[in-house]
Amino acid sequence: MRFVGNFLWFVFCGGLINCILWLLAGLVFAITIVGLPFSRSAVEIAKMSAFPFGKEVVHVRDLNGEDGDNFTIGGVLGFLLNLLWLFTFGIPLFLLHVVSGIIAFIFIITIPFAIQSFKLALISLWPVGRRVVTKEVALIVRNESAKKYIDKQRSN
């Protein structure tokens, strides 16, 4: 089912065009030193734009098993970069994906594509420090994160 959804998305819903545009944007961001974190984010959005079915977004802190207290791309630096992203590219991309998701909800058969548009809207809004992984990996990461949180609460 994922293959069919991803194929239809890639061919008919602009997945190929979105992916190419995001890879070009990542290349442009990579030219500057300041834009390197944005280039990683553009590659993550490109992966999600091309084949969104069966993928989810997780925070890099949860993926790496870090506490989040240190100065990482997911910490203060990630927040500042996301804030810069939000006011330059984030809001227009977010609105584009939300509008396309609302349009896709008009027809019953395209509701799964609307859901994918909303997933893209979320990662487009705040992408720095996020990674695109399969649903299975996301479930494992979230379960481990929840277990660490429960263990921390019980020890207090």
Image (cartoon, rainbow, N blue to C red):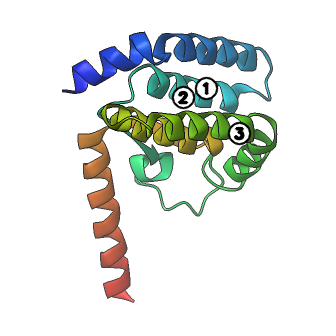
Spatial CA distance of label 3 from label 1 is 11 Å
Spatial CA distance of label 2 from label 1 is 5 Å
Callout 1 crowding tier (Cα within 10 Å): few <14, some 14–19, many ≥20: many
Residue that appears at 67% across and 34% down: 93
Q: Secondary structure at mark 2?
A: helix
Q: Is residue 96 left or right of residue 114?
A: right
Callout 2 crowding tier (Cα within 10 Å): few <14, some 14–19, many ≥20: many
Q: Secondary structure at mark 3?
A: helix
Q: Which residue is mark 3?
A: 90
Q: Is residue 18 left or right of residue 8?
A: right
Q: Position of residue 109 (x, y in %)?
A: 30, 32
Whether tag 2 and tag 1 are in contact, CB under 8 A, the answer is yes
Q: Is residue 9 above or below residue 121?
A: above
Q: Amino acid at mark 2?
A: Ile
Q: Is residue 50 above or below residue 58?
A: above
Residue that appears at 46% across and 34% down: 104
Q: Position of residue 136 (x, y in %)?
A: 23, 42
Q: Is residue 63 left or right of residue 124?
A: left
Q: Amino acid at mark 1?
A: Ala
The quarter of the picture where residue 38 lies is top right
Residue 45 shows which numbered tag?
Answer: 2
Residue that appears at 42% across and 47% down: 64
Which quarter of the rendered picture does the N terminus lie within?
Answer: top left
Q: Quick one: label 3 or label 1, which is nearer the N terminus?
A: 1
Q: Which residue is mark 1?
A: 42
Q: Position of residue 9 (x, y in %)?
A: 39, 20
Which quarter of the rendered picture does the C terminus lie within?
Answer: bottom left
